[in-house]
Every structure is written in C-alpha cells, then in structure tokens.
Image (cartoon, rainbow, N blue to C red):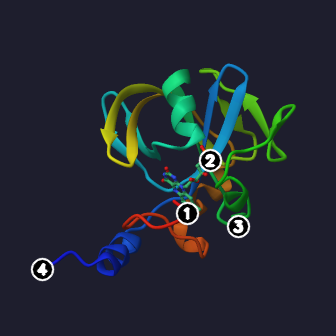
C-alpha cells in the first residue's frame, strides 16, 4: 500500500494520548509546553519518554538543563494547553499566569497539576523532527487524588498533534 498522509493521520490520531505540560529550565530560562507524546518505557529504573520537537525551546532547555517535569492536568480545565503551545512567559513564580515552584531537579513544577513526575535525562535519542528524551523518575507526587482518574486527554480538546508533518508544527 502506498503511504497516504491522511490515512496515517487518522490512524495516529486514533491512538489515545494524554495532554500534559512539560516543565523545563536552564539557568534563568523557564518554560512550560503542551505535550501529548508521553509514555512509560521501563520499570526498573522507572523511565518515562517524551518526544519533543527539535526546534522547540523546551528541547533546548532539556538538553542544557538535563531534566524535565511531566505535569498531569485535570481534564475539566484544558484552557492552558492553548497558551502553552508557544513559549511561555515567566513572571515571578508563574508561567503564563499559572503558579509554579522549583522542583528538586530545578525545573518548574506546576502547583495546579493534579500529579507530577520529575525526571533526569537518562538517554536522548535523535528521531528526525523530534528528540526522544528518556527520563528517570526522581520525584513524583499526587496533589489531587480525587481527579487522578480524570486526567486531560487529547480527545478533551479539538486540538490534534502528530501524524505527518504539516504547517504549524
Ligand atoms: C494538543 C497539542 C499537543 C502537542 N504535543 C506535542 C508533543 O508531544 N511534542 C512536541 O514536541 N510538541 C507538541 N506540541 C507542540 C508544542 O506544544 C509547541 O510546538 C510548542 O510551541 C513548543 O514549545 P516551546 O517552543 O515553547 O518549547 C503539542 C501542541 C498541541 C497543541
């Protein structure tokens, strides 16, 4: 079968994905970014992989800073994902107006996340348009157990990510 872009898109978009915010930092530069490609890839150590566009600010900050946070979000509040699909504005202890704190690895952790993981980069795999950062989980907490079963997912928004390359991302 010839590869048909719309077919690839439909198949890729049919795979369920979380929506979360990735926190990254190098020195005084902090960022948060909307992310859907997140998955666990090992149990011992507990490794989590995030694949990040090679041109993203977050990509540079993770390479230079060596760590990242995965901030799990309540599905009833998907508005932040729109704002965090471009580089975030830091103002005091906030990113795009959302409160953050410095995690144990130095990266921003969103105070409004329902749970978070902090990871140090264990391995980086170049994947064409993206780099796959495999992170070892070094800190984690559940902030709001009541809604942990209701984490934000791609299907909660009208946004899409993935499939074949197109203008925009
Ligand atoms: C719904 C949605 C999901 C996204 N998922 C990813 C992803 O998994 N990986 C990625 O590299 N970019 C993803 N993006 C794109 C980034 O959020 C966007 O390119 C951002 O501008 C890059 O962030 P930065 O330059 O501020 O670091 C997604 C965007 C949207 C709207």
Q: Secondary structure at mark 3?
A: loop
Of circles 1 and 2, the one toward us is: 1
Quadrant location, the N terminus: bottom left
Name the residue at the left extreme. 1
Distance of mark 3 from mark 1, alpha carbons? 26 Å
Q: Which mark is residue 33?
A: 2
Above-or-below relation of 131 to 122: below
Q: In front: mark 4 or mark 1?
A: 1
Distance between mark 2 and mark 3 Cα atoms: 18 Å
Q: Residue at x 52, y 70 (%)?
A: 160
Left of 112 or right of it: where is 163? left
Task: Identify the secondary structure beneath mark 1.
Answer: loop
Residue 38 locus on image (x, y percent): 44, 49
Q: Nearer the viewer, residue 157 or 45?
A: 157
Residues at marks 4 and 1, CA–CA distance in whole angstroms: 28 Å
* Pointer 4 or 3: first along the chain: 4
Q: Quadrant of residue 148?
A: bottom right
Q: Which residue is mark 3?
A: 76
Lower position in the chain sequence, tag 3 or tag 1: 3
Residue 24, quarter of the rendered image: top right
Residue picked out by circle 4: 1
The residue sitting at the front extreme is 167
- Seen in the picture, residue 132 relative to 136 is either above or below; the reply is below
Give the secondary structure at mark 2: strand
Task: Say left or right for 30 vs 64.
Answer: right
């Amino acid at each position: 079968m010839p590869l048909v872009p719309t077919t690839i898109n439909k198949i890729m978009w049919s795979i369920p994905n979380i929506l979360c915010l990735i926190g990254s930092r190098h020195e005084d530069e902090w960022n948060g970014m909307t992310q859907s490609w997140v998955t666990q890839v090992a149990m011992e150590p507990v490794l989590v992989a995030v694949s990040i566009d090679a041109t993203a600010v977050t990509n540079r900050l993770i390479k230079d800073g060596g760590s990242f946070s995965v901030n799990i979000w309540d599905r009833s509040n998907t508005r932040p994902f729109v704002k965090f699909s471009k580089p975030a504005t830091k103002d005091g202890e906030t990113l795009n107006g959302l409160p953050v704190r410095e995690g144990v690895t130095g990266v921003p952790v969103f105070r409004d996340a329902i749970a978070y993981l902090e990871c140090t980069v264990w391995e980086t795999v170049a994947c064409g348009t993206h780099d796959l950062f495999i992170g070892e989980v070094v800190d984690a907490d559940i902030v709001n157990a009541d809604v942990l079963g209701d984490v934000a997912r791609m299907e909660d928004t009208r946004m899409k990510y993935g499939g074949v390359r197109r203008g925009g991302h």
